[in-house]
């Protein structure tokens, strides 16, 4: 497995051009927590933060050492792949292709709690999709998570905050119970109100993988 390092290196990193966007247009209302979370992510850290339905763990998708640490924390095999989460569709375009026949439907579902399995771009590191030629992704409507993506300057890995086989954490205390002091930061905030994880749809066939 090629080491892409912090924020990655090589053609994919050059194409993405991840830039920390700390001069956000809404800088006055961006919380200190969100700013600190973006800084932790840029340093290769792993954070826990609220999403639409559960607390999630996030890191730089191109940072191999962060990914390996995340897999170890969750006791999760590297063949499962990860969901990418973004604040806008442009952050996902370096990673995935959106089929023309489904583009309008996908764009209308975002920002929102729908995850689509999309064809992966050819030169991505294998750990993102678990060795598959597809990647699951969504543009989130969760304001705090979107703000973190904006300040980080790109999309992030988002996986439920739990050790594999354990219930997903739904608040900071439950995150601490499973991971103790092993994370770089736990972002406090409200969940998006979904009772269950986001539905997942295949972008080629349109079929539901998870309802």
Image (spheres, helix red, strand yellow):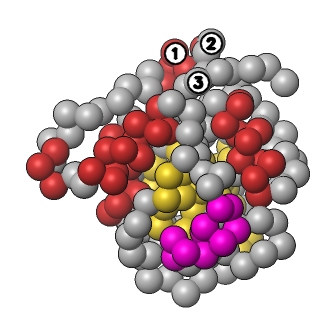
Query: Closer to the camera, 128 or 209?
Result: 128
Q: Secondary structure at mark 2?
A: loop
Q: Which image quarter: residue 117?
A: bottom right
Q: Secondary structure at mark 3?
A: loop
Residue 21 coordinates in the image, percent (x, y): 29, 33
Magenta residues span 171-180
Q: Residue furthest bottom?
A: 195
Q: Are the residues flagged by discs 1 and 2 in contact, CB closer than 8 Å?
A: yes
Q: Going 83% across and 73% down the picture, which residue do you hit?
A: 165
Q: Please tell me the numbered disc located at residue 10.
A: 2
Q: Going 35% across and 60% down the picture, which residue do you hit?
A: 144
Alpha carbons under labels 1 and 2: distance apart: 6 Å
Camera-near label (2 vs 3) is 3
Q: Residue furthest top?
A: 10
Residue 181 coordinates in the image, percent (x, y): 62, 55
Please give the residue where the numbered disc 3 appears in the rendered image.
6
Q: Is residue 110 magenta?
A: no
Please give the residue where the numbered disc 1 appears in the rendered image.
14
| Visible residue check, residue 199 | no
Above or below: residue 121 compared with residue 113: above
Above or below: residue 124 compared with residue 182: above
190 displayed left or right of 54 = left
User: Which quarter of the rendering shows the N terminus?
Assistant: top right
Alpha carbons under labels 2 and 3: distance apart: 12 Å
Q: Secondary structure at mark 1?
A: helix
């Amino acid at each position: 497995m090629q080491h892409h390092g912090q924020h990655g290196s090589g053609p994919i990193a050059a194409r993405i051009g991840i830039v920390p966007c700390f001069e956000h247009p809404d800088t006055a209302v961006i919380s200190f927590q969100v700013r600190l979370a973006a800084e932790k992510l840029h340093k290769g850290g792993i954070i826990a933060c609220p999403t639409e339905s559960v607390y999630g763990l996030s890191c730089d998708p191109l940072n191999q050492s962060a990914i390996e640490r995340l897999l170890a924390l969750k006791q999760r095999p590297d063949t499962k792949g990860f969901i990418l989460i973004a604040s806008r569709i442009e952050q996902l375009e370096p990673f995935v292709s959106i089929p023309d026949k489904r583009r309008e439907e996908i764009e209308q579902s975002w920002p929102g709690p729908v995850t689509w399995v999309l064809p992966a771009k050819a030169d991505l590191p294998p750990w993102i999709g678990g060795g598959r030629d597809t990647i699951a992704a969504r543009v989130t409507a969760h304001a705090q998570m979107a703000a973190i993506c904006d300040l980080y300057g790109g999309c992030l890995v988002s996986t439920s905050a739990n050790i594999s086989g354990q219930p997903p954490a739904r608040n900071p205390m439950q995150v601490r119970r499973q991971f103790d002091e092993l994370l770089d930061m736990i972002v406090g905030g409200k969940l998006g109100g979904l009772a269950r994880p986001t539905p997942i749809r295949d972008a080629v066939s349109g079929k539901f993988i998870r309802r």
